[in-house]
Image: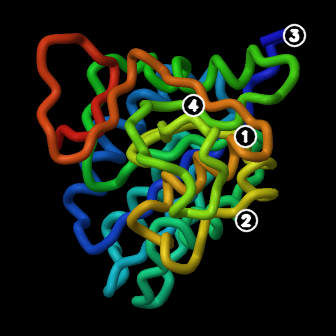
Amino acid sequence: MAGGTRLGVTVVMIPHNDEERALTRLRRDLLPSLALSWRLLDAELVVIDNSERQLTRLARAVRNNGLFPAKYRWNKGRNLYYGPAMNQAVREASRPFLLYVCANHGRMHDPTWIWDLLEPLVSDPSESVALTGSFYPSGPPSPMGFADWLEQVHVQGGVFAARTSVLARFPYPDGEYAHWGSDIYQSFQLQQHGYVLVDVPSVKSVWRSRVEGEHWKYVHDES
């Protein structure tokens, strides 16, 4: 970055009940990657806990991470689901860019995956790139109320980077698509408003399928 300015990034996790998996994502996959990038990133952690009971060990690990300022918010047993929880995280965010990491699935193979997701946003002078990650087929847009000319792909919700201000302007759905289909809805919404989605080849986000035969820096589907 010009002048040695660090890039402001809010890192978001949304756990639901499984504390061990969330701790693994945090300690094994996320914090080591952030530690390597601390000279580049002015990062903060925001954890929105949708669990039935507060995940106390996770809360302690987040708040005492030793690297970055952190916020842990337990919704007192209410599961807001993915979309509304993402909206809550965006409201809590104080950095211009947002990095979401699934708390249940994912494995870091190369700690530079974070910059791969952020680079298309940072290098975009028009600020038209709103979302980066792993493309996945979406099906036709019209059943969700969007124009059929939109590209039938979406950024899979397992791991992605975004402009925080854009997500604040165009929130995730809180009705029928509050969970399943929320990432598809958001990708269509952003496309319809003229924003660009970018596929990042080094990051792979899939749903319940094995990834074989190639090297990725981060794979969402692995445990």
Q: Amino acid at mark 4?
A: Thr
**Which residue matches tag 3?**
3
Q: Which mark is residue 132?
A: 4
For marks 3 and 2, the one nearer the N-term is 3
Query: Which circle, 2 or 1, is nearer the viewer?
Result: 1
**Is 220 placed above or below 115 here?**
below
Q: Is residue 214 left or right of residue 200?
A: left
Question: Do labels 4 and 2 touch, CB within 8 Å?
Answer: no
Using the image as rendered, state which of residue 136 and residue 203 is in the foreground.
136
Query: Which circle, 3 or 4, is nearer the viewer?
Result: 4
Q: Which mark is residue 91?
A: 2
Q: Is residue 18 left or right of residue 148?
A: left
Disc 3 is placed on an element classified as helix
**Which residue matches tag 1?**
163
Real-space Cα distance between discs 1 and 3? Answer: 21 Å
**Is 66 placed above or below 176 here?**
above
Query: Which circle, 1 or 3, is nearer the viewer?
Result: 1
